[in-house]
Image: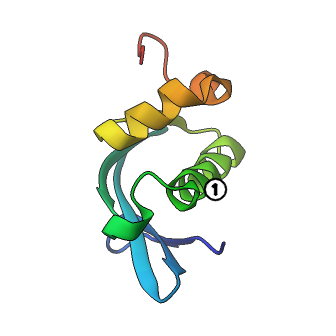
Amino acid sequence: MVIKNNEFSRQFETTVDGQLLTIEYSFQEKKIFLSKVNIPEQFDGSETMSDFLKQILLVAEEKKWKVVPIHPKVAAFFRKNPVYKELLPPGIKI
């Protein structure tokens, strides 16, 4: 899966089976706020969504960003994958 950081649109993008998947973000003080998930229905709740988020979190980890999961689907991912909770800023509990 190839992830593109579209800084102009403030979203991460990938294409799967000809479909565009995006996760919108905002950035403030070394924190990235994942605010909107745009994923076609057939990928909702699938491994594709999980793989997409994992790739984004790898980018955040490399850049030493903290991640604030605003969107419920992103928060649910953190609940199901506690290994990524170290990326949450202090005081944020999911």
Determine which quarter of the picture holds residue 21: bottom left
- Could you tell me which residue is drawn at 59 percent across and 70 percent down? 3
Q: Is residue 54 visible?
A: yes
Residue bearing the label numbered 1: 55
Q: Is residue 29 visible?
A: no
- Could you tell me which residue is drawn at 39 percent across and 68 percent down? 42
Q: Is residue 28 above or below residue 6?
A: above
Q: Secondary structure at mark 1?
A: helix
Residue situated in front as seen by the camera: 46 or 83: 46
- Point out residue 93 in the picture as x, y percentages from the top left corner: 42, 13
Q: Is residue 91 above or below residue 23?
A: above
**In-image side of 93 versus 88 (left or right):** left
- Of all residues, the one furthest to the front in this rendering is 42
Name which residue type carries label 1: Gln
**In-image side of 32 versus 3 (left or right):** left
- Of all residues, the one furthest to the top in this rendering is 91
Look at the image and tell me in which quarter the C terminus lies.
top left
Look at the image and tell me in which quarter the N terminus lies.
bottom right
- Of all residues, the one furthest to the bottom in this rendering is 18
Q: Coloring scheme of the render?
A: rainbow
Numbered-mark total: 1
Residue situated in front as seen by the camera: 57 or 10: 57
- Point out residue 27 in the picture as x, y percentages from the top left corner: 38, 47
- Could you tell me which residue is drawn at 64 percent across and 56 percent down? 55
Q: Is residue 24 above or below residue 29?
A: below
**In-image side of 26 versus 18 (left or right):** left
Q: Is residue 86 above or below residue 70?
A: above
Residue count near mark 1 (Cα–Cα under 10 Å), binned few <14, some 14–19, many ≥20:
some
